């Protein structure tokens, strides 16, 4: 029995032609948008930039999704994964009316069409992929691989939502996307929405066939069944009959709706949760479907040549009829009235209001964002005997996060690749579990289908992508990771930073919750794992991003970590990076001191200085371990060279070092000079690579900065030896400081003592396997 009537097929085909006409026109035309006059050379863009290949397939999918949205009153968003062919989603949002609502100058008439077509991939206009400027988008299509993880993040805690995610078969070959097929093991259909993956199988990438297209149908289906999917194949390459291919797609989507309804009903009825097989669609179409079949005697439609611009500028100018005939093949006279307004019979097929995928408020998450409920972080403070008390900073932070989870059910998630316990967030499991919808055994720990912690997925890509999807759709969260392995998602962080940068310039895009990273198990706590686990380069990577996006913090103890995290978790439209200690470490500041210090972002520690008002030399630090070593170095200088006047400066907010005309948090030159002086030598112990500090302060007056940091040294060794190998230890810091003071007998004796201590240290660790006693049991007392 047919799903569609003849009238519906005719209307759907006009709708399809309209989308394709607009998608071609955006590639080629800067004028004459309705072809009311014969096409002229002047009507064609001088530089043709864009991608056609996946546009017609996406148009076909979009219009059929709209049909079922309207029929069943579905709550659905569209996630465009194939990368470019952004004109498809632009065309559809224009047809739905959303584009003109957010860009009133792009009117629903001939003048508006001309502006829309010209602006695509044109200087001062829109990009060729589904960028933030496109209504309904939550996925920056410029880099492939993140669409499906974004879709999974979007449906978390959104039980009515269906995220239709179109995945290019080239995109399916990327690492992040290949992993994302397993996201269905983390969805509870009672609490979460449904992701509908649609594999757009058109056979080619830029210049090569795709793997998915060159394996057998049986192998392809087995692959997806093995990943827990229930695949439905729609093949529009078998026929050129519109009634056949529209009927096949409509039937497939009817089947999808029934299966989703059954999944939702079954989970409500069953007392025991059983993970279902979720539907997906394998949609097979020709690459560049409906474009010219032959151009310059070469086959185009259905080949890699249709990936970008099927008809080059040279070919188009040589024979304008090839473009004109292509556009006219969609019968524009049936699509627009004389004024350029889309005909009513097509517009009647689109959903209305927030049911439009381009206008769904979930895809503009700031609209629905609820402020996070946070407890008073000062209630989690620890009492401090300065330089004596020890605490596990991350463990205490876990107690604070535990209560955030309690206060924000369905609005806050914790992501991290199998590291929550390793990173000392144990306390969160007092109120929640890890999210897990696969088999659970009796001896498993903290696993359930209702958890708020995504810790049971060993993929940084998946954690990042799902968190981004969760944030982009109006919720809050955090990502904790071993510092070295956050580098795996460098590029994903870059893309999110670019998204935030662009959305800040789009008035209709509302602010979303910040992307918060807590990096622990950091470089100075990886002596046991060794060289492979040591890499602070994420900081350098993010420091290159726009100053109004990135923030970096180095809390030095439990109370400063609580204060810093409380601030970051409530911000919007930033990428916040917090580097924190997880091992028992010495504590420095009371809660009141910590709040004041964090508010300033950096400051002088009078209590660790010897005549801070008029120093001979400045000892500066950023990071928990560098702070310990700087304070220990200051104590050595006080004991052995008391005539040397020292000032100890600690930096919590790294971007305070940058000039105020470069970063919103930056100090003015006057403020900077007040702290670091104009000419005194500054021995700066930094958590990461030394060059980052030099980059931040290069335009300051004082060029006497001597930065100690990670030098790519360190194997399996002791904690203190890691510092010695990279010369951020107290003995090397003292030796460096003594280079810039007058040589006295005290100074000479102190130098000799430091060299002696370094030799003693080296001999002791080789013999005993642990650090020397005066380092292991060091305190500030005395």
Image: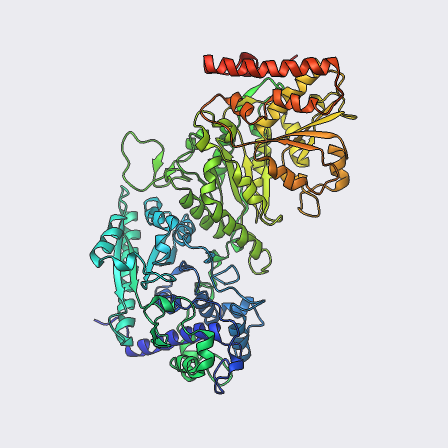
On the picture, is 132 further left or further right than 422? Answer: right
The x, y position of residue 351, in whole percent, is: 42, 68
Residue shown at the point (46%, 44%) measured from the top left? 489
The x, y position of residue 685, in whole percent, is: 62, 29
Q: Is residue 131 above or below residue 637?
A: below
Res. 108 in view? no
| Closest to the observer, 407 or 349 | 349
| Closest to the observer, 746 or 402 | 746
Considering every residue shown, the one lying at the far right of the view is 614
Considering every residue shown, the one lying at the far bottom of the view is 37
On the picture, is 763 further left or further right than 627? Answer: left
- The colour scheme is rainbow
The x, y position of residue 521, in whole percent, is: 48, 30
The x, y position of residue 317, in whole percent, is: 47, 80
Q: Is residue 465 above or below residue 522?
A: below
Quadrant assignment for the C terminus: top right
Please give the count of numbered marks on the rendered protein. Answer: 0
On the picture, is 249 further left or further right than 386? Answer: left
Res. 502 in view? yes
On the picture, is 605 further left or further right than 344? Answer: right
Residue shown at the point (28%, 69%) measured from the top left? 236
Quadrant assignment for the N terminus: bottom left
């Amino acid at each position: 029995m047919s799903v569609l009537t003849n009238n519906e097929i005719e209307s759907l085909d006009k709708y399809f032609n309209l989308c394709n006409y607009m998608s071609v026109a955006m590639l080629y035309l800067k004028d004459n948008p309705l072809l009311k006059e014969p096409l002229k050379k002047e009507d064609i863009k001088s530089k043709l930039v864009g991608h056609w290949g996946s546009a017609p397939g996406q148009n076909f999918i979009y219009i059929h999704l709209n049909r079922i949205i309207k029929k069943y009153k579905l709550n659905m968003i569209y996630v465009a994964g194939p990368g470019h062919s952004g004109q498809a989603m632009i065309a559809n949002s224009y047809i739905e009316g959303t584009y003109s609502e957010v860009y009133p100058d792009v009117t629903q008439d001939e003048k508006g069409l001309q502006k829309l077509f010209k602006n695509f991939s044109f200087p001062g206009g829109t990009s060729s992929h589904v960028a933030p400027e496109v209504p309904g988008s939550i996925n920056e299509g410029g880099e492939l691989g993140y669409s499906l993880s974004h879709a999974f993040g979007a449906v978390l805690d959104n039980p009515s939502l269906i995220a239709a995610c179109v995945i290019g078969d080239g995109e399916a070959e990327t690492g992040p996307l290949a992993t994302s097929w397993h996201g269905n093991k983390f969805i509870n259909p009672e609490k979460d929405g449904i992701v509908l993956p649609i594999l757009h199988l058109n056979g080619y990438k830029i210049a090569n066939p795709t793997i998915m297209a060159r394996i057998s149908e049986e192998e392809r289906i087995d692959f997806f069944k093995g990943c827990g999917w229930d695949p439905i194949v729609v093949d529009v390459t078998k026929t050129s009959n519109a009634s056949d291919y529209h009927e096949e797609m409509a039937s497939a989507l009817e089947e999808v709706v029934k299966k989703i309804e059954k999944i939702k009903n079954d989970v409500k009825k069953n007392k025991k949760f059983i993970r279902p097989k979720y539907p997906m669609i394998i949609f097979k179409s020709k690459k560049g479907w409906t474009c010219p079949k032959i151009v310059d005697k070469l086959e185009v439609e259905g080949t890699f040549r249709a990936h970008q611009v099927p008809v080059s500028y040279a070919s188009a100018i040589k024979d304008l009829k090839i473009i004109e005939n292509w556009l006219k093949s969609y019968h524009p006279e049936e699509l627009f009235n004389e004024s350029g307004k889309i005909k009513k019979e097509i517009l009647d097929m689109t959903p209305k209001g927030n049911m439009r995928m381009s206008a769904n408020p979930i895809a503009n998450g700031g609209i629905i964002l609820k402020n996070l409920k946070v407890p008073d972080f000062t209630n989690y403070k620890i009492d401090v005997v300065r330089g004596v008390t020890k605490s596990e900073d991350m463990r205490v932070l876990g107690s604070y996060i535990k209560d955030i989870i309690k206060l924000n059910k369905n609005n806050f998630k914790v992501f991290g690749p199998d590291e929550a316990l390793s990173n000392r967030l144990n306390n969160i499991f007092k109120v929640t579990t890890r999210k897990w919808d696969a088999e659970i055994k009796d001896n498993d720990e903290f696993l359930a289908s209702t958890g708020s912690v995504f810790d049971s997925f060993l993929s940084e890509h998946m954690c990042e992508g799902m968190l981004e999807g969760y944030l982009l759709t109006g919720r809050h969260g955090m990502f904790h990771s071993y510092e070295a392995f956050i580098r795996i998602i460098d590029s994903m962080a870059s893309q999110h930073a670019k998204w935030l940068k662009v959305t800040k310039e789009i008035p209709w895009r509302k602010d979303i919750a910040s992307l918060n990273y807590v990096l622990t198990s950091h470089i100075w706590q990886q002596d046991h794992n060794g060289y492979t686990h040591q890499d602070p380069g994420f900081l350098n990577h993010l420091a290159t991003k726009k100053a109004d996006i990135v923030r970096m913090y180095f809390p030095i103890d439990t109370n400063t970590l609580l204060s810093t995290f409380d601030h970051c978790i409530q911000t919007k439209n930033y990428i916040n990076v917090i580097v924190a200690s997880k091992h028992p470490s010495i504590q420095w500041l009371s809660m009141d001191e910590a709040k004041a210090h964090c508010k300033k972002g950096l400051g002088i520690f009078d209590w660790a200085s010897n005549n801070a008002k008029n120093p001979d030399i400045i000892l500066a630090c950023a990071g928990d371990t560098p702070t310990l070593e700087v304070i220990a170095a200051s104590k050595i200088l006080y004991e052995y060279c008391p005539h040397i006047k020292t000032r100890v400066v600690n930096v919590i907010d790294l971007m305070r070092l940058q000039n105020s005309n470069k970063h919103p948090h930056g100090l003015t030159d006057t403020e900077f000079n007040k702290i670091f002086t104009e000419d005194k030598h500054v021995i700066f112990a930094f958590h990461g690579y030394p060059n980052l500090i030099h980059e931040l302060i290069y335009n300051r007056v004082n060029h006497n900065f001597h930065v100690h940091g990670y030098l790519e040294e360190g194997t399996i060794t002791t904690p203190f030896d890691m510092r010695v190998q990279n010369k951020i230890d107290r003995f090397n810091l003292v030796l460096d400081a003594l280079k810039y003071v007058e040589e006295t007998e005290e100074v000479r004796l102190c130098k000799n003592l430091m060299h002696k201590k370094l030799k003693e240290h080296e001999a002791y660790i080789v013999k005993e396997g642990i650090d020397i006693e005066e380092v292991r049991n060091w305190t500030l007392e005395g």
